[in-house]
Amino acid sequence: MMTLNIKSFVATLNQIKYSNFLFEHKDKIRKGATLCLFLCLTYICTQLVLSVLASMHKPTIEKTSITILKPEPQDMSAYRNLFGKSNDVDLRESYKIVKPTRLNLTLIGTVFKEKGALAIIENANRKSKVYQKGDNIASNVLLKDIAKNYVVIETGGKLEKVLIKFDYIDAKKPHKNKTFDLNSR
């Protein structure tokens, strides 16, 4: 029992010291608490005033006009033939009136590469060969020009066309493979 009384005495003594400390410094504690409450109240009032002012203020939008400048149209005809007039276009236009040849020649295909165009032509003997512009296809038959779907030949001083022959693949017939060595040129 004695130990219990000592513990309660010590606890009471601590409470008395704490109470005495509060009693001695009550003015300082009161001023500190008042200052904290004042600062909180000031902060709340400031936030309230700012929110009211922000809702009253309507931002003004300035109207600005933007003018878009369009360049004046220029005559581009001066740039059309910058490197000189091409003769190939004129020749190709004149080839429209050239009639197909009656020679037994068949144009299998055309190939366009860096160094010029090539034409794969089959002759009467069913032999295919690769030609380029200026080659003789047969005696007295000269390859004048190569286009996408036709070639122009000169035979006896007269221009003629050899049109490309389109063979459509039939799924029921066996396919014949033809290979050509384009690097032989």
Image (spheres, rainbow, N blue to C red):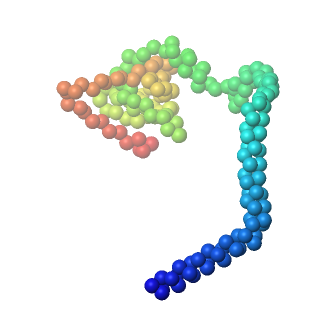
Q: Which of 104 and 11 is in front in this view?
A: 11
- For the point 51% across and 12% down, the residue is 97
- For the point 36% across and 28% down, the residue is 108
Q: Which of 127 and 11 is in front in this view?
A: 11
Q: Where is residue 94 in the image (x, y as percent from the top left)?
A: 55, 16
Q: Which of 142 and 21 is in front in this view?
A: 21
- For the point 73% across and 54% down, the residue is 37
Q: In which quarter of the image is the N terminus?
A: bottom left
Asked if residue 131 is positioned above or below residue 73 in the image, the reply reads below
- For the point 24% across and 25% down, the residue is 170
Q: Quadrant of residue 47?
A: top right
Q: Where is residue 62 in the image (x, y as percent from the top left)?
A: 80, 27
- The answer to whether residue 5 is left or right of residue 71 is left
Asked if residue 29 is positioned above or below residue 39 in the image, the reply reads below
Asked if residue 98 is positioned above or below residue 122 in the image, the reply reads above
Q: Quadrant of the C terminus?
A: top left
Give the mark count. 0
Residue 66 visible in the shown view: yes
Q: Which of 84 and 153 is in front in this view?
A: 84
Residue 105 visible in the shown view: no
Q: Where is residue 35 in the image (x, y as percent from the top left)?
A: 77, 57
